[in-house]
Amino acid sequence: MLFLKDRGFQHPVASEITPHAVYEQRRQMLRLLAAGGGGLAMAGWASREALAQIPRPNKLAALAGARSGVAGATTMEKLTAYADVTTYNNYYEFGTDKSDPARTAGTLKSRPWTVAIEGEVKKPKVYDLDELLKLAPMEERVYRLRCVEGWSMVIPWVGYSLSELIKRVEPTGNAKFVEFVTLADAKQMPELNSRVLAWPYVEGLRLDEAMNPLALLAFGLYGEVLPNQNGAPLRLVVPWKYGFKSGKSIVKIRFTDRQPATSWNRAAPSEYGFYSNVNPNVDHPRWSQSKERRIGEDGLFAKKRATTMFNGYEAQVGQLYTGMDLKRFY
Ligand SMILES: Nc1nc2c(c(=O)[nH]1)N[C@H]1C(S)=C(S)[C@@H](COP(=O)(O)O)O[C@H]1N2
Ligand SMILES: [Mo]
């Protein structure tokens, strides 16, 4: 704070600062730095303080993460407000309206929790959540999340690369795909009796996609454990793919030699393929994918943003798809 003052920045008195406002202020500084506005001392301050100290909304248990060293893992774009991240959700097990999960997911029991690792691995194992929380150092990653419906958010996740877990269970030579199975319990999830999707919600990745360091096993956001509606206690975040590839509340990870049958692909195969990479050049059969609405920017004069190839992560993941026809493998 003092530092900001010394540099002549305007800021409110401490008592008026919400954690989110402090966070935004620090990020503003980082953007200035990135634009060449600061010196070396500032850069040191920035990396030590600004991204590693995550102000919390003070609702849930703290879960801190150090700034990630993974290339491309932290966008400097403005964060989507915590209130939006936690009240505008897709979690169909808790209702299909965006506002449903925040209201109804209180019944999700996120502890005790286990994740079974099965299939083509040398070390199959049922991990307890506490073991997973200590498996690798927690990192903060600020990812864009782009839903296939045409909206996006910028969210500071806390977690570590999925590859950390994959390395430890040692996939066999037959492992070509990874299947993610999420919780399906009618006692905890009000919509499980509905036929919207085939439960459990299943998603999948090719093994090399799952090994890409950007594929994140997330346990928290905004410096706290995940709210239930965002997929407590752990979920996947695959930032270069449409949001539905990022399964919430994962209970099983299965390594297979065959491409998994995923829930959305089974529900509407012509609309939702296995790959589902964000691609402004391949439209959804019923709507364009070339633009997106950033949640929180939906005022009267807000312009839609251009959707970018692989959601802006092309430098990091483009090589995974060399030679593939992305219109065919949508
Ligand atoms: N189990 C489960 N995971 C899910 C979904 C779901 O309905 N059930 N919805 C997906 C979709 S469509 C999106 S856009 C993201 C939304 O994540 P968020 O609510 O944390 O922004 O979660 C994905 N993961
Ligand atoms: Mo989505």
Image: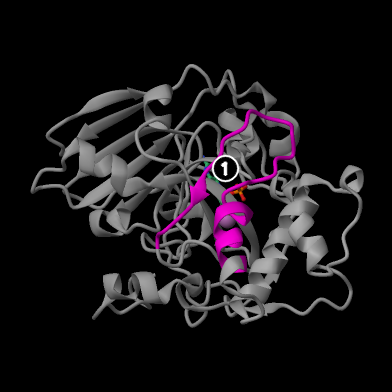
Query: Is 107 placed above or below 277 here?
Result: above
Q: Closest to the observer: 244 or 156? A: 156
Query: Is 227 placed above or below 256 here?
Result: above
Q: Residue at x 62, y 32 (%)?
A: 62
Q: Which amino acid does the dot numbered 1 rest on?
A: Val
Indicate left or right for 119 with 1 as reference. left
Q: Which residues are magenta?
A: 42-70
Relative image position of residue 43 (x, y in whole percent): 57, 67
Q: Residue at x 52, y 79 (%)?
A: 280
Q: Closest to the observer: 98 or 73? A: 73
What element does badge 1 sit on? loop
Residue 296 seen by the camera? no
Q: Is mark 1 within 8 Å of ligand 1?
A: no
Relative image position of residue 200 (x, y in whole percent): 44, 34
Which residue carries the number 1 mark? 196
Residue 65 located within the stretch drawn in magenta: yes
Q: Magenta stretch mostly in which secondary structure?
A: loop
Relative image position of residue 67 (x, y in whole percent): 50, 53
- Number of marks in picture: 1
Indicate left or right for 276 with 53 as reference. left
Residue 67 located within the stretch drawn in magenta: yes
Query: Is 277 placed above or below 291 here?
Result: above
Indicate left or right for 327 with 46 as reference. left
Indicate left or right for 79 with 64 as reference. right
Relative image position of residue 185 (x, y in whole percent): 51, 23
Query: Is 206 placed above or below 123 here?
Result: below
Q: Residue at x 48, y 28 (%)?
A: 184
Look at the image and tell me in which quarter the C terminus lies: bottom left
